[in-house]
Image (cartoon, grey):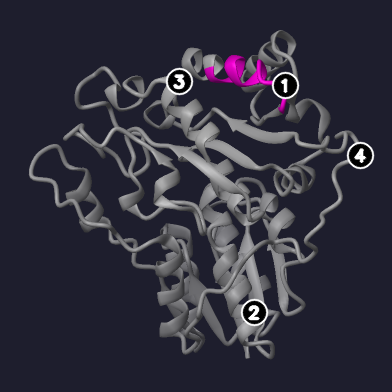
Amino acid sequence: MHILIIRFSALGDVAMTVPVISSLAKQYPDLKITVLSRPFARAFLENLAPNVNFIGIDLKVDYKGLRGIKRLYDELMQIKLDLVADFHDVLRTKILRLLFITHGVKTAHINKHKAEKRRLCRRNDKKFVQQPTSFQNYCEVLERLGFPVNLQFKSIFSESDVALPASIDSKLQGERWIGIAPFAAHEGKMYPLLKMEEVVRRLAELSSYRLFLFGGGPEEKKILTSWADKYNRCINVPNILQGLSEELALMSHIDVMVSMDSANMHLASLCDTRVVSIWGATHPFCGFLGWNQSDTDTIQNSDLSCRPCSVFGNKPCFRGDHACMNSISPDDIIQHILQT
């Protein structure tokens, strides 16, 4: 039996498939699994299990438009699929599903619970109910295809002692490593940078701490470089590591990652690293808390009746002042790190 699992989208969304796919692979070792995603996912999906094969494609270059989707379908049919699990359910995957169905391939797709999430995030009369997590939603797809999954996942690394990248010095006796990932795709999910710099400055004053600053884009790297230049024991990770694989190896050695509701929360979670996550416009009730992370490690203002105002943090602030993030003080974050 051969199953195709499809999930494109952003890095964090794809990372959340890993505990599910890993559990599926281990519980059904005779099941052949092919995962179709974007090329970046190779770092955490390619070597997940012996019966998992990864295909990374660039939709914007190689498979554009309807012709591109049809060509992708023709190529996928060459690998003789029995089942298709659509973990994404967007227009291109709907078209792929239709093509597979017309040729007798059984398919199932994700229920994103959009209506329930809209009720959770609306301005008035919110229905404040925990939504199924992405992990649960992915499992539900597989169950409908005849493969119920008991989620059992710890880390993408099979070895407990993962080798550090060569450019990172070993941890000193008594030293604590803190990851800081201050960026997010949308303003509603990002802690104000001046306040985050205050967190970095104060932690850097503690001699027992070494700080690792994570970010990706050119502007993000400039900000991280300025912080690393100003404060002791701060390392600008993208300046010294080569790619996502090395970043994941480093994350596995970090004692705690401080992150927004963003991809780095999910990447650190895949490395069995504790994450202190900061939430503003979004909320863990939408179902996107990192794998195996604790509610007690979320920092959020629970007194604001306007929260959450957005599933993904991309909507205009109801109040116009982003009080959800601005009301969180650097002390709130620092004390949480120091007390745990």
* Disc 3, SS: helix
**Circle 4 is placed at which residue position?**
166
Q: In which quadrant of the rendered view does residue 15 lie? A: bottom right
Q: Nearer the viewer, mark 3 or mark 4?
A: 3
For the N terminus, give its image quadrant.
bottom right
Circle number at residue 276: none
Q: In which quadrant of the rendered view does residue 139 lie? A: bottom left
- For image coordinates 66% across by 31% down, the residue present is 214
Picture coordinates of residue 312 (x, y %)?
37, 41
Circle number at residue 207: 1
Going by the image, does 307 lie left or right of 137?
left
Q: Nearer the viewer, residue 212 or 334?
A: 334
| Type of amino acid at the residue the image marks with label 2 | Ala
Q: Nearer the viewer, mark 4 or mark 2?
A: 4
Real-space CA distance between mark 3 and mark 2, rounded to the nearest whole angstrom: 42 Å
| Type of amino acid at the residue the image marks with label 1 | Ser
Which label's residue is closer to the chain start, 3 or 4? 4
